[in-house]
Amino acid sequence: MDNKLAETNARVDVADVLRGLAVMGIIILHSIEHFNFYSFPEEVPFEWMKFTDKAIWDGLFFTFSGKAYAVFALLFGFSFYIQDDNQRRRGKDFRLRFLWRLVLLFIIGQFNAAFFTGEILTMYAMIGIILPIFCRASNKVVIITAIILILQPVDWIKLIYALINPAYEPATNLAGKYFREAFVVQSSGTFWETVKMNLWTGQMANMAYALEHGRLTQTAGLFLFGMIVGRKGWFLYSEQNEHLWFKTLGIALLCFFPLYGLNNMLPEFVSTKAILAPLKVILVSTRNLSFMVVLVTALLITFYRVKDRTFLMRFAPYGKLSLTNYIGQSIIGSLFFYHWGFELGRYLGITYSFIFGIIFVLLQMAFCSWWLSKFKHGPFEGIWRKLTWINKN
C-alpha cells in the first residue's frame, strides 16, 4: 500500500469512528426522548428510577445534545472534500455532480421525514449548497466565512436591534406551536395520518427549531470547517497535528466552562425576552460547539495514541452505514413509540428507554458488521452512491 493510500485510509477510518460515535449518541438521545414524542408513564415502577431517570436525561443531554449533530455536520463537509479532491485528481469537476447528490439527499430526507419529526437530511441537502460555492475559495475566505456563520450573525443582529429598540417584541415561538400540533397526531393518529403530519407539520417544526436555535448558520459553518479539516489534513497523525489537537483541546475547555456558567446565570440578570432569547442562542450554540471540539480532539488524540484500536474500530462500520442507521432509527423509533405502532412511551420511562436505545444500537452495530462482510456499501449508502453516479461517462 503506498503512503498516499495509507494516509487516506487513516483519515477516513478516524472519520468513520467519529461518525459512528456521533450516530450512537443521536440514537440513544432520541430513544430517551421517545423520538420527539414526549409521552412518558405517570409513575415510575421503582423509587430508585427517579434518580436514574434524571441522571440519564441530564447526562445524555449534557454530552450529546447539540454536539453529536455538530460532529455529523463537520464530517459532512469533510466527506465532500474527500469526494471533490478525488475527482479533481482525476481531472474532473465534482460540483455539479454534488448538487445532484444533494437533490437525492433531499428525496431521501423526505422518506425519512415521513417517520420522524427530527429529520435533518432535508436541511443538510439545502444548506449543503454552500460547499460547491466555496470549495474553490482560499482557506482564508472559507475560514472567515465559517467563523462568521458559527458565531450566529442573525442572533447578533436581533440582539443589537433589541438593545437599540426597547419596545421590540420577538416573534412567537413557531417550533413549539408545530411540535404541539405534531404531538396530537403522534398521540392518536393512524400510520397515514402520522406520515401526512410528519411531511408538513413535522418538518415545519424541525426547520423552525433549527432557525430559532441557530442550527442553520452553525451547520453551514461546520460544513465549511469540515472541508478545511480535509484540506489541511488535520485528521492525519503528525507531531504538528498532535500539538494542534492538544492546543485546540485546551482552548475548547477554557471556552466551555465560562460559557456553561454564564448561560446558567444569565436569566437572573437579563429579564427582557427580546435580549435574553438571542443571547441564549449565541451562548448555548458556542458552548455546545466548544464541547463538541473537546469530544473530537479527545477522540483524535486517543485514536492515534493507543496501540490497540480494536474497540474504537468497532464503531467504524457503524459510521460507514450512518445514513442507513439514521433512517433505521426513524422507522423503528416511530413504530415502537408512536400511537400508530406499539406506543411504548406509555410504559417505558427514561431508564428503560435508555436500555432500549443501547440494545437498538448494539443490534444495528451487529447488522453493520454483517452487512459490510458481504457488501461494500450500506443499503441506503449504496442507493445514494449509485444514483449519484448515474449516467456517468
Image: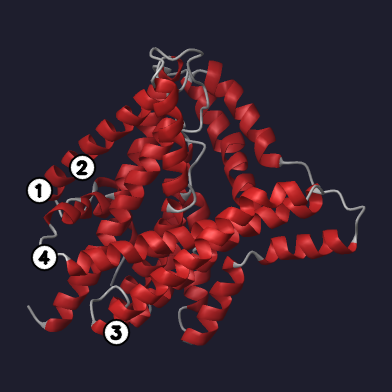
Number of other residues with Cα within 10 Å of mark 4, as a class: few under 14, some 14 to 19, many 20 or more: few
The residue under label 1 is 374
Q: Are marks 4 and 2 in contact (CB under 8 Å)?
A: no
The residue under label 4 is 307
Q: Residue at x 35, y 23 (%)?
A: 352
Q: Residue at x 44, y 20 (%)?
A: 345
Query: From the image, which quarter does the C terminus lie in?
Result: bottom left
Of callouts 4 and 2, the N-terminal one:
4
Which one is in front, 323 or 238?
238
Q: Could you give the CA–CA distance between mark 4 and mark 2, rounded to whole angstroms?
A: 23 Å
Q: Could you give the CA–CA distance between mark 3 and mark 2, rounded to whole angstroms?
A: 34 Å
Q: In screen coordinates, is 305 left or right of 244?
A: left
Q: Disc 2 or disc 1, which is closer to the eye? A: 2
Of callouts 3 and 2, the N-terminal one:
3
Image quadrant of residue 102? bottom left
Q: In screen coordinates, is 279 left or right of 49?
A: right
Q: Is residue 191 above or below residue 10?
A: above
The residue under label 2 is 365
Residue 93 lies, in percent from the top left, at 38, 79
